[in-house]
Image (cartoon, rainbow, N blue to C red):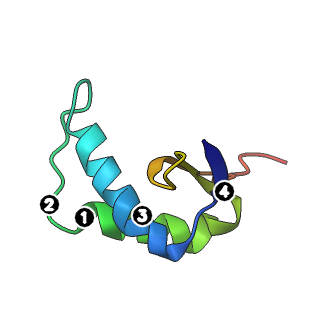
Amino acid sequence: MKIRKIKLGDLEHCSRLLENEYSREPYNENFKRGTAMQYLKSKYRYCKDNSFVMVNDDNKIIGFIFLSMSHWSN
């Protein structure tokens, strides 16, 4: 396995992962067509420099993370 920076071309596969995994317990979410992709495109726009995918030995994406930093106080 390997971890690398996320690329725009990864979003389609990541959106399918998001839809599949969040449809299970405990979330039971049902995304409307394209909703997961829109969500990830928004995250990518603001977080791509600090976001990553994990790929297996066949270079298939098996996980991803978007890192977003927020400042709540000085």
Q: In the depicted view, which residue is nearer to us: 61 or 12?
A: 61
The amino acid pointed to by label 3 is Leu
The picture places residue 13, in percent across and down from the top left corner, at 36, 61
Q: Which residue is mark 4?
A: 4
Residue contact between numbered discs 2 and 1, judged by CB atoms under 8 Å: yes
Category of crowding for the residue at label 4, using alpha-carbon neighbours closer than 10 angstroms: few (below 14), some (14–19), many (at least 20): few
Q: Position of residue 52 (x, y in %)?
A: 61, 55
User: Residue 57: x, y in percent?
Assistant: 54, 46
Whether label 3 touches label 2, CB < 8 Å:
no
Q: Front-most of 8 and 43?
A: 8
For the point 25% across and 32% down, which residue is it?
27
- Measure how far apart labels 4 and 3 are at the Cα level: 17 Å
Tell me the quarter of the picture where residue 62 sits. top left
Q: Amino acid at mark 1?
A: Thr
Residue visible at 73% across and 51% down in the picture: 71
Q: For mark 3, does the 10 Å Cα neighbourhood hold few (<14), some (14 to 19), or many (20 or more) residues? A: some
Q: Left of 43 or right of it: where is 21?
A: left
Few, some or many residues within 10 Å of mark 1 (<14, 14–19, 20+): few
**What is the C-alpha distance between the residues marked 2 and 1?**
5 Å
Query: What SS does tag 2 mark?
Result: loop
- The residue that disc 3 covers is 40
Q: Secondary structure at mark 1?
A: helix
Question: Given this view, does label 4 or label 3 mark the residue nearer the observer?
Answer: 4
Residue placed under numbered mark 1 in the picture: 35
Local crowd size for mark 2, using a 10 Å CA cut-off: few (<14), some (14–19), many (≥20): few
Tag on residue 32? 2
Query: Mark 2 or 4 closer to N-term?
Result: 4
The location of residue 11, given as percent across then percent down, is 42, 67
